[in-house]
Amino acid sequence: MYLKTVSDGEATGEIAEAYARERADMGMVMNATRALSARPDMLVPVDRLLNQLRDGFSLGLAAFRMITLVVAKHVPSSYCSHVYFRGVTRFVGREQALAIQTDHRSAGLSERDVAMLDYAEQIAIDASRIRAADIDRLRAVGFTDLNIADIAYAASFRCFLSRYFDAVGATAELPFLDEDPAVRERLAVGKP
């Protein structure tokens, strides 16, 4: 980490509570959470927004994680690619997660999932190029306006967080790194 963050021993109040929750859930405090503590007053609101978006995501957690994996590739963010590859693997298996990360269009996904990930990818690459026809395509495969808003929120928020994590030097923790060096290399889409 390039910046000084709140250590476990320095954590008090809401930061200590956030660290304790994450340690209870994951067995550790992620570098992402520590990175947010460089501006202590922002950790809790940013974490709350992420949790609200993820936990209330109208398309479910698997879709949220697939969107995040695809967006992380295009930001590009090695940290988020490693973390969300692990998350997507839990839902679809390792080989399918690799296929999605490589090229979601040829990963054997449904037309609906491909359209969702195409939209998320375009948000990461250049959202200014999105037109009404892109939204019409999403509606044509069954997405509601709430679903489309959720996809846009998830993709845009991941762009924000991934760029922040890179800007302050957050790196992926060992439990998120794949055991295969070739896969780790593939997921290192940004900083090594």
Image (cartoon, helix red, strand yellow):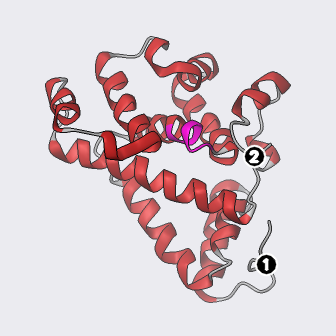
Q: Which residues are magenta?
A: 71-76
Q: Position of residue 47 (x, y in %)?
A: 51, 67
Residue 167 is marked as: none
19, above or below 66, in the image: below
Horizontal side, residue 177 vs residue 40: left or right: right
Quadrant of the rendering where the C terminus is positioned: top right
Rendered view: 128 above or below 3: above
The question of residue 15 being in magenta is answered with no
Q: Are marks 1 and 2 in contact (CB under 8 Å)?
A: no
Q: Characterize the local packing of mark 2: few (<14), some (14-19) or many (20 or more) Cα atoms within 10 angstroms.
A: few
In the depicted structure, whether residue 52 falls above or below residue 59: below
**Residue 147, located in which quarter of the rendered image?**
top left
Q: Quadrant of the N terminus?
A: bottom right
Q: Nearer the viewer, residue 111 or 8?
A: 111
Q: Determine the secondary structure under disc 1.
A: loop
**Circle number at residue 4:** 1
| Residue matched to label 2 | 191
The residue that appears at 66% across and 76% down in the rendered structure is: 37
